[in-house]
Image (cartoon, rainbow, N blue to C red):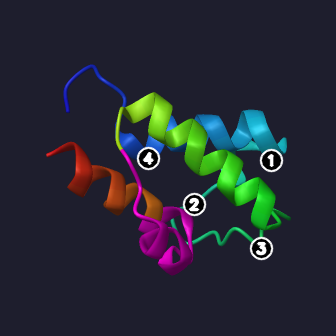
Amino acid sequence: MSTEQTTFEQVKGMIVDRFGVPSEKVTEQMTFEDLGADSLDVVELVMELEDRFNVQFEDEKIEQLSNVGDAVQYIDQLVQ
């Protein structure tokens, strides 16, 4: 992507805002547990991601997301 932020950069910004994690600590390998996120936090984050990217996550898929990279890849699949 040229001047547009990548999906990861956008998701990373949302994680920094929501969880107060330093930007440099957010990686694609970071799990939601690493963020200190409980199941409600994950649901709320997913809702924000759906709004931001104008996509709809499948419930079964949400349960399969183990880290930030999984969420980014899933968003990229849905946006195509």
Q: Are marks 1 and 3 in contact (CB under 8 Å)?
A: no
Membership of 54 in magenta stretch: no
Q: Residue furthest left?
A: 80
Main SS class of the magenta portion in the image: helix
Q: Earlier in the sequence, mark 4 or mark 1?
A: 4
Q: Give the Cα distance between marks 1 and 3.
A: 13 Å
Q: Nearer the viewer, residue 5 or 57?
A: 57
Q: Earlier in the sequence, mark 3 or mark 2?
A: 2
Q: Which residues are magenta?
A: 56-70
User: Please, what secondary structure does the residue beneath circle 3 have?
Assistant: loop
Q: Residues within 10 Å of mark 1 (few under 14, many from 20)?
A: some
Q: Earlier in the sequence, mark 3 or mark 4?
A: 4
Q: Give the Cα distance between marks 3 and 2.
A: 13 Å
Q: Residues within 10 Å of mark 2 (few under 14, many from 20)?
A: some
Say which mark, if any, is on residue 21.
1
Q: Are marks 2 and 4 in contact (CB under 8 Å)?
A: no
Q: Give the Cα distance between marks 3 and 4.
A: 18 Å
Say which mark, if any, is on residue 27.
2
Figure check: 36 above or below 21: below
Query: Which residue occupies 38% across, 34% down?
Result: 53
Q: Earlier in the sequence, mark 2 or mark 1?
A: 1
Nearer the viewer's eye, disc 3 or disc 2? 3
Quarter placement of the N terminus? top left
Q: Nearer the viewer, residue 31 or 50?
A: 50
User: Please, what secondary structure does the residue beneath circle 4 have?
Assistant: helix
Q: Earlier in the sequence, mark 2 or mark 4?
A: 4
Three-letter code, disc 2: Thr
